[in-house]
């Protein structure tokens, strides 16, 4: 890890020296190296542990071990894995689609309408976004139990969407607020209806915002597990996150197996993350504070 | 109907002309709504999301309040619940769980917020340049923030275990016999709080970074020409420009810490004893471990009151920032 850090820093030097204001910063470099360790090491350890045998894991076994793909072979042979991946995918995609379909018009309305009712709606969304999941799961469990929706993927998509819709709407609102009214006026003159103007004119302008929020919702919904372990009554229906949570909260944990599951369930996230990082870096900061 | 009418009353501040045409009769505008540009048609866009939240977010909160004044157990969950008035709250008040969880919550939130905000600003300062070493570090950190909490919680449970990496380092460097980070009630709460702060720092750094990047570069250049040291630059320019962001982020971090459940569940399950049981965790374990949904709801209602207070503080401080 340290070698990556130093090579990355030395590679960066030519770019930095072009800027006139840059001075040598030994303290900043030290802190960055330390951060590489504090954040890189746990990440590295997940991967390393997944390549070990259970016997090599504890008792100081560090970098010296003979790597094996046993944990992955076992994980791939586990009949629960394909089901769990499929469940995670369905829940994450279903939640992303449902939240975006509801949040984009919602955010648009809140960006365009002023007055006390819009203010109240914003306040309610901020409150809902802050409600602890544990306060939601108790009544949702009762509600879904009465509606005979327990143990279904639909209940997970609904619960996740209810949790993430306020956040998504608040994050999207500034993107819509930045769209000039004149664009819509032009569309209205051309005779486009409100809905058509929204879909054909406004949405394309805010596509970055929609992509940012969509990626975030996917990432969070993929990792959600509190609703999953409680709304699914049968562990055969668990998504990846719930399987990992179930294994890790027990005793006598099979660490290589657990870490192999963690790596497998993180790979789709890595793809989504790499594709959306540039958007996330800008979009998160805009929507969180405004 | 009343909502559409209210929207029209809300519109004048923005578009007085159109609001006047629709003021007289709420139903008259329907036929020509496609051409009209009042707030009313736009407010219709909020309806699908509003109705969805009404059913699956606001109604559940009403249900939670109702459950808190009823006796609800696994057996009676799908039947009618006997009303017990404020008995659940009285039971909470006289027991020791609530007080213990409240103290744990305060300590937990204080540690996560202090380290999360100060750490976030510190990281933002050292990674604000777009050099590859900084950009990659920020990218890696934000990826960790985006990873499922079960994954992050598991790896730290592993690293902090008796035979885990941290204790192996402690022992081999002769610092001592190893620390029972997660298995001793003196250390467990602090350990989980530190891991939570670790997980939230990347997000805070990202938001702070954009506040720092908004500083006019000519100010920094002028400071550098006047011979300001790095430390002076940080103290006199960077930190003051991040102050408004820091207030908002501090509230968001308090909320994040208060809501925290995932890491506690994965790393300690509230234990040892009840040393890492915070208010939301207590509510969960009363409902889903002891299957007393009534008491769990009562604790949940108390958590909601705290959240409502935080939401008000948040709205006020963001207004102040926008006005400034």
Image (spheres, rainbow, N blue to C red):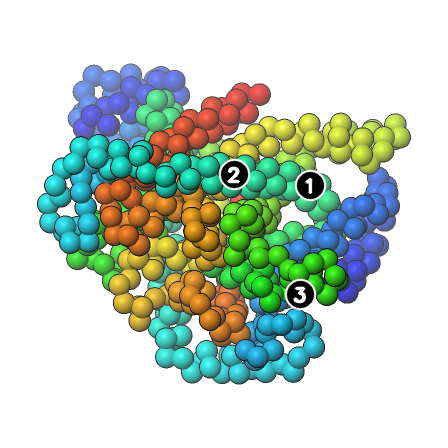
Whether B320 is drawn above or below A273: the answer is: above
Chain to which mark 1 belongs = B
Q: Residue at x 66, y 79 (%)?
A: A65
Q: Are the residues under marks 1 and 3 on the same chain?
A: yes
Q: Give coordinates of residue A68: x percent, y percent.
A: 59, 82
Dot 3 alpha-carbon crowd within 10 angstroms: few under 14, some 14 to 19, many 20 or more: many
- Mark 1–mark 3 distance (CA, rounded to whole Å): 29 Å
Q: Which residue is mark 2?
A: B107
**Residue B35 visible within the image:** no
**Is A262 above or below relative to B23?**
below
* Numbered badge on residue B122: 1
Q: Chain of mark 2?
A: B
Label 1 crowd (10 A; few <14 / some 14-19 / many >=20): many
Q: Counting residues from the N terminus, which is met first, the one under dot 1 or under dot 2? A: 2
Quarter of the rendering containing residue A186: top left
| Gap in angstroms between the C-alphas marked 2 and 3 | 28 Å
Q: Quadrant of residue B67?
A: top left
Tag 2, which secondary structure? helix
Q: Residue at x 79, y 56 (%)?
A: A9
Are the two marked residues, 2 and 3, in contact with CB atoms closer than 8 angstroms? no
Rendered residue at 79%/32% (across/down): B233
Q: Earlier in the sequence, mark 1 or mark 3?
A: 1
Q: Is residue B39 visible?
A: yes
Tag 2 and tag 3 share a subunit? yes
Q: Chain under label 3?
A: B
Say whether residue B226 is left or right of residue A214. right
| Position in image of residue A192 (x %, y %) | 34, 40
- Read off the residue under disc 3: B168
Q: Secondary structure at mark 3?
A: helix
Q: Secondary structure at mark 1?
A: helix
């Amino acid at each position: 890890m340290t070698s990556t850090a130093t090579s990355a820093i030395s590679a960066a030097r030519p770019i930095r020296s072009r800027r006139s204001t840059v001075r040598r910063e030994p303290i900043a470099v030290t802190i960055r190296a330390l951060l590489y360790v504090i954040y890189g090491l746990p990440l590295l350890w997940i991967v390393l542990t997944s390549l070990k045998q259970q016997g090599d894991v504890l008792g100081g076994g560090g970098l010296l071990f003979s790597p094996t793909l046993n944990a992955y072979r076992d994980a791939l042979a586990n009949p629960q894995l394909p089901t769990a991946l499929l469940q995670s995918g369905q829940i994450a995609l279903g939640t992303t689609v449902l939240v975006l379909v509801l949040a984009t018009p919602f955010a648009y309305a809140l960006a365009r309408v002023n007055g006390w009712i819009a203010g109240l709606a914003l306040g309610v969304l901020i409150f809902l976004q802050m409600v602890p999941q544990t306060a939601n799961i108790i009544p949702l469990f009762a509600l879904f139990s009465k509606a005979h929706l327990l143990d279904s993927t639909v209940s997970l998509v609904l619960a996740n969407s209810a949790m993430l819709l306020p956040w998504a709407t608040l994050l999207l609102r500034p993107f819509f607020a930045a769209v000039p009214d004149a664009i819509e006026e032009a569309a209205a003159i051309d005779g486009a209806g409100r809905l058509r103007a929204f879909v054909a004119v406004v949405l394309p302008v805010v596509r970055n915002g929609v992509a940012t929020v969509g990626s975030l919702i996917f990432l969070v919904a993929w990792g959600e597990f509190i609703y999953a372990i409680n709304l699914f009554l049968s562990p055969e229906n668990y998504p990846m996150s719930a399987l990992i949570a179930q294994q890790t909260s027990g005793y006598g944990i099979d660490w290589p197996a657990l870490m192999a599951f963690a790596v497998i369930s993180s790979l789709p996230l890595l793809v989504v993350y790499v594709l959306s990082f540039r958007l996330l870096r800008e979009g998160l900061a805009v929507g969180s504070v405004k | 109907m009343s909502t559409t009418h209210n929207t029209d009353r809300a519109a004048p501040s923005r578009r007085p002309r159109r609001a006047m045409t629709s003021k007289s009769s709420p139903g008259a505008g329907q036929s020509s709504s496609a051409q009209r540009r009042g707030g009313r048609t736009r407010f219709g866009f909020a309806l699908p999301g509003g109705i969805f939240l009404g059913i699956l977010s606001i109604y559940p909160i009403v249900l939670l309040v109702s459950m808190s004044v009823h006796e609800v157990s696994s057996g009676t969950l799908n039947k009618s619940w006997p009303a017990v008035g404020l008995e659940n709250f009285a039971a909470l008040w006289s027991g020791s769980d609530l007080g213990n969880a409240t103290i744990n919550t305060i300590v937990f939130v204080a540690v996560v917020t202090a380290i999360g905000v100060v750490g976030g600003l510190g990281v933002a300062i050292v990674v604000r340049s777009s050099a590859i070493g900084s950009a990659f570090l920020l990218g890696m950190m934000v990826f960790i923030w985006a990873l499922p909490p079960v994954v992050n919680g598991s790896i730290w449970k592993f690293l902090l275990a008796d035979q885990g990496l941290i204790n192996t380092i402690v022992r081999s460097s002769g610092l001592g016999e190893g620390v029972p980070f997660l298995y001793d009630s003196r250390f467990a709460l602090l350990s989980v709080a530190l891991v939570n702060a670790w997980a939230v720092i990347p997000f805070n750094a990202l938001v702070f970074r954009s506040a720092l990047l908004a500083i006019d570069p000519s100010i920094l250049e002028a400071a550098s020409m006047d011979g300001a040291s790095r430390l002076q630059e940080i103290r006199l320019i960077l930190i003051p420009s991040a102050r408004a962001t820091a207030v908002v982020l501090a509230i968001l971090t308090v909320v994040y810490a208060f809501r925290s459940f995932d890491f506690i569940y994965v790393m300690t399950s509230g234990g040892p004893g009840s040393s890492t049981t915070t208010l939301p965790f207590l509510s969960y374990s009363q409902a889903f471990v002891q299957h007393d949904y009534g008491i769990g709801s009562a604790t949940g209602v108390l958590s909601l009151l705290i959240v409502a207070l935080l939401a008000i503080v948040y709205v006020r401080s963001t207004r102040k920032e926008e006005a400034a």
